[in-house]
């Protein structure tokens, strides 16, 4: 995790802090830029730079741009829009340069000052970044939405008018959202003043894969937790990646306020999507200073990580078996790696009788949220994903597994595998003898 609050001794007084957002008046990225000693480790870990010769890489996007900027008020280079926000450079840097904070800030400044608000790129990016605003409409008429989005003419139009690639199939909307299911169920089945979690389900588990969110509820209730489902907005991940920082600020403000209230109520925050937890834990504190931002970040966990730390999860799974699953090809999303979570799923599944989970390596899936949905990035996205596709093909497994919704789209698109979330396997193992329907 990068550390923007780590000033070096040589941060001279003669420079004015670069202030990008009015609410972040204390943001000063000079110390981070001065920490860079140009080792290029970030560049060699960048999946976009590896396959796209025109992308200058994270060292340029981060410390070099900030140095140039303070010397001669240099404009942010448009190539920052080619960064997929995978954040691999961030964890690769041996000198704690706050690369993703620099990239997010630079992208926000580029979009604000240099991108026409009437351009096709801006409109397309705004739509992709604000999936949360469009999804409720589609979820009201999911069958119609799925039919229309499944038509090849819709995909063709999407590419011609907006520049959304026609190569990918739009993900289907569930016929019942997670939140509707939760309401009909009557909320939590377990009340426990001493063990509560606030579930941050994010957009995709609500609108597209409610089975993942339901699995989380059942697994946590199995361990005696009271589950709260607070009001929430998008985590902001697609907004950061598209430089829509005002949108991200609004979403983050809602989330921090609601999650802080849940903390006050005695809950810890749990996310099932690795990009959502990454956003809350790292990007919010790096970019925003709402009251309780740090507190919410410090008390947010990945779903499996929390159970491994607080419960005897391995012990509970010993001797368990799962119906309907066999061998898995597991891909650790870049945002899970950045949180140090890449090994936990395979270790955990290995405990289950008859299950073999193959880690398909540490390459990036290539889709990186909205990046691979842009027509101009599609080929690059698939080139980045090749290594993962090859490893999945040779893994001799039947099902793909990952914690990230867009990685799962790329895995399915590149291999034809059915893709599931580790929580679904956990649920199947814990309830193998008594499947629950409510
Ligand atoms: S890895 Fe860190 S120190 Fe090395 S070039 Fe990149 S930003 Fe600079
Ligand atoms: S976030 Fe990913 S794509 Fe962007 S510069 Fe860093 S490694 Fe490259």
Image (spheres, rainbow, N blue to C red):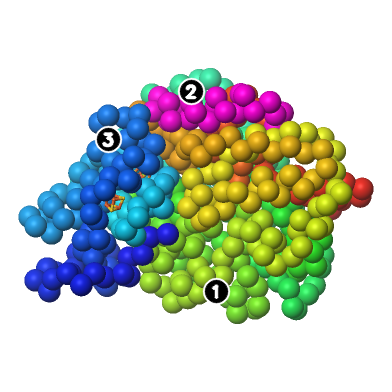
Q: Is residue 221 magenta?
A: no
Classify 356 as above or below 222. Answer: above
Circle 3 residue: 55
Mark sitting earlier along the chain (3/2): 3
- Would residue 408 appear left or right of 102 to someone viewing this image? right
Magenta stretch, overall SS: helix
Q: Quadrant of the N terminus?
A: bottom left
Question: Which region shows up in magenta?
Answer: 379-399
Q: What percent of the width, then of the height, locates residue 56?
A: 24, 38
Q: Nearer the viewer, residue 246 or 371?
A: 371
Q: Say what secondary structure mark 1 lies in.
A: helix
**21 vs 148: above or below:** below
Q: Estimate the spatial distance between the alpha carbons at disc 1 and disc 2, rounded to whole Å.
A: 41 Å
Nearer the observer: mark 3 or 1; the answer is 3
The residue singled out by tag 2 in the image is 167
Provide the residue designation for mark 1: 260
């Amino acid at each position: 995790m990068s550390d923007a609050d780590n000033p070096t001794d040589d941060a001279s007084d003669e420079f004015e802090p670069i202030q990008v957002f009015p609410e972040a008046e204390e943001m000063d990225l000079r110390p981070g830029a001065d920490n860079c000693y140009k080792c290029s480790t970030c560049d060699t870990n960048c999946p976009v730079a590896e396959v796209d010769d025109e992308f200058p890489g994270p060292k340029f996007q981060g410390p070099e741009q900030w140095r140039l900027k303070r010397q001669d008020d240099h404009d942010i280079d448009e190539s920052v829009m080619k960064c997929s926000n995978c954040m691999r450079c961030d964890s690769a840097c041996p000198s704690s340069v706050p690369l993703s904070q620099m990239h997010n800030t630079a992208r926000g400044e580029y979009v604000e000052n240099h991108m026409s608000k009437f351009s096709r790129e801006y409109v397309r990016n705004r739509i992709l970044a604000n999936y949360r605003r469009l999804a409720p409409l589609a979820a009201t008429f999911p069958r119609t939405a799925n039919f229309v989005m499944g038509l090849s003419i819709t995909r063709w139009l999407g590419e011609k008018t907006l520049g959304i690639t026609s190569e990918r199939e739009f993900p289907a909307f569930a016929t019942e959202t997670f939140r509707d299911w939760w309401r009909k169920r009557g909320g939590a089945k377990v009340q426990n003043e001493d063990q509560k979690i606030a579930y941050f389900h994010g957009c995709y588990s609500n609108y597209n894969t409610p089975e993942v969110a339901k699995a989380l509820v059942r697994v946590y209730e199995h361990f005696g937790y009271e589950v709260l489902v607070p009001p929430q907005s998008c985590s902001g991940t697609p907004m950061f990646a598209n430089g829509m920082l005002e949108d991200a600020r609004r979403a983050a403000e809602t989330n921090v306020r609601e999650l802080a209230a849940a903390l006050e109520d005695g809950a810890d925050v749990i996310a099932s999507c690795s990009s959502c937890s990454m956003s809350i834990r790292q990007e919010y504190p790096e970019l925003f200073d709402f009251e309780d931002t740090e507190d919410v970040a410090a008390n947010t966990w990945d779903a499996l990580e929390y159970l491994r730390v607080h419960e005897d999860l391995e012990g509970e799974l010993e001797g368990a078996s799962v119906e309907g699953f066999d061998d898995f090809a597991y891909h650790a999303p870049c945002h899970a790696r950045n949180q140090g979570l890449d090994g936990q799923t395979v270790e955990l599944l290995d405990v289950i009788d008859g299950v073999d989970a193959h880690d398909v390596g540490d390459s990036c899936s290539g889709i990186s949220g909205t990046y691979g949905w842009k027509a101009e990035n599609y080929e690059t996205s698939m080139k980045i994903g090749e290594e993962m596709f090859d490893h999945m093909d040779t893994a001799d497994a039947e099902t793909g597994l990952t914690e990230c919704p867009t990685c799962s789209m790329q895995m399915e698109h590149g291999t034809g595998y059915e893709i599931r979330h580790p929580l679904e396997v956990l649920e199947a193992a814990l309830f193998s003898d008594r499947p629950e329907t409510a």
